[in-house]
Image (cartoon, rainbow, N blue to C red):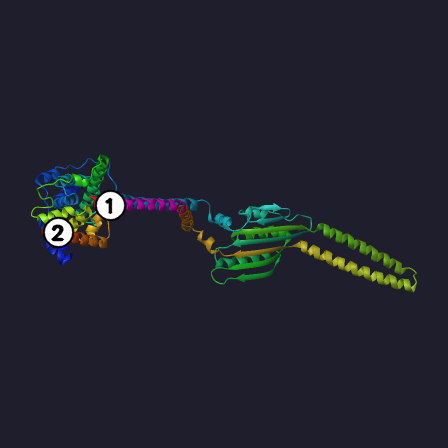
Amino acid sequence: MKAKTSAEGFAEAAKRHLDDVHAFLVYLTRDRAVAEDLTAETFARALERWHRYDPRRGEPRTWLCQLARSTALDHFRAEDRRRRREGRYAVAELRESAEPVFGEGLSPALERALAQLSAAEREVVALRIVLELDGEGAASVLGISTTACSTRLSRALAKLEKEVSAGVAA
Amino acid sequence: MSPLELVDDRFEQLASELKAATPRASIELRERIESLTPPSRRRPAVPLRRLVPAVGLAALAGSLGVAAVIGVVNSGSGDASKRGAVRSDVAALTPEGSSIHGAPPQRATLEDSLPPAQGRLQQYDASLTLRVQDADRLSARTQQAMRVTRSLGGYVASASFDVPGRKGTSTLMLRIPIGRVQRALAAFAGYGTLLSQKISVQDLQQRADAQTSRIGTLRRAVAALQTQLRGSVSTAQRKRLERLLSIERSRLAAQQKTLGATVRRAELARVGLTLVTPTAKANAASGRFDRTLDDAGSVLARELEILLYALVVVGPLLALGGAAVALGRAQRQRSDRQLLERV
């Protein structure tokens, strides 16, 4: 009975927060296909560890984003090792795609500006702006203080605006 | 308050655009997530955060249980009087020559210890310390000891009765005919728990015999002088003999007096009887419940001692382990940050 309740709880959380986790991973990876795979991997891990989730320690969305970030970091490390082994750089692997990565309706300038940000900058933008997590929740996901989180967000937005302005002028 | 409202006005349009274009999960991804099945759990997982307090509580309960069991088991072994005797600062019964020090717990031992020898003059000294239940019993036993002493033909040389509060001490110096001292000691032993005793016997017979012999010699000397004086002697010689006779008579009187004192000393035994009410510690150990608490407390104190020792030994290792974990975590975070800056 308890297991059934737990499974139902997970199903409900997955249904409610799938878009959020997916959006976060899209911003983090800049790649929709990779983001989909990592989202599936994240929820598979979440299902496996759902019994460990303690609602008193945070919202399900925050916990899922922490898992998603951890999954993405594992992916980045694996990719980093692979690229080093193969002597290639990530930039060289960037796929030029006509389709927007960060969402339908974004201006091309903003799309390009987002791609110029580092993953660390994009993740704070995703958490605070796109998912509208509060400072404490976002800091918890990133493993930093709320002050550091605010500073990082301000710098990321300033850089983003600068890149957008430069793109429009060009 | 929405996070968008917290963003600087300069970025408001930027933030609104980003928010409006949030990427959505595809139907295929949604179906993939919905098709996830829970993994089969081999064993029920117990979260570490719940396990640690549970183990701590179990250890605490175990420690208290062990202390309680040891307390109950120990409290049931032996009666209170034995424990009181053991706790008191006394030595074992060890005859040393003609003296006995210690606290024999058995009344028969006290009665039979060092009885005065029949037909010989002896100086008999005894000192007893007994514990009585309370101040009322202290008063009653003191009066009883005085009555017993008088009934046996002795007398009370001195008495001191001091009861400042609930505790008290009574000290009696008694003189009891040596032939009846064993009866007196047997009676006193029943007044309470024997805490200590000292009995010493000194033989006076040789001294008395020597004094008697000296008296005989002096008497013979006096008789000889008297015989000489009854004969015909010159005036000067008579004066000398009379002076010698006076000296010898004085010596004889002194010697007779000394012999009398020796004989009197051998007639009456000197008994010091001290009665005390229980000390706080002895009182605490009197009841079984109190003894249980006492023993359980000792076990708990020992357990705490062991725990403290273990902490002293393991503490530095734990601190090193914690520092290593913290260092590893910090390095991991730095590595993640550098990785995210590169991607």
Comparing B271 with A81, the one in front is A81
Q: Amino acid at mark 2?
A: Ala
Query: How much space separates mark 2 and mark 1, taking CA atoms?
Result: 26 Å
Q: Relative to the observer, which residue lies in front, B223 or A145?
A: A145
Badge 2 density bin: few <14, some 14–19, many ≥20, Cα 10 Å: few
Q: Residues within 10 Å of mark 1 (few under 14, many from 20)?
A: few
Residue B200, disc: none
Viewer-proximal residue among A53 and B299: A53
Q: Which residue is mark 2?
A: A166
Q: Nearer the viewer's eye, disc 2 or disc 1?
A: 2
Q: Quadrant of the N terminus of chain A?
A: top left
Mark 1 belongs to chain: B
| Label number found at residue B338 | 1
Q: Which residues are magenta?
A: B310-338
Is B282 in front, or is B188? B282
Q: Is residue B257 above or below residue B24?
A: below
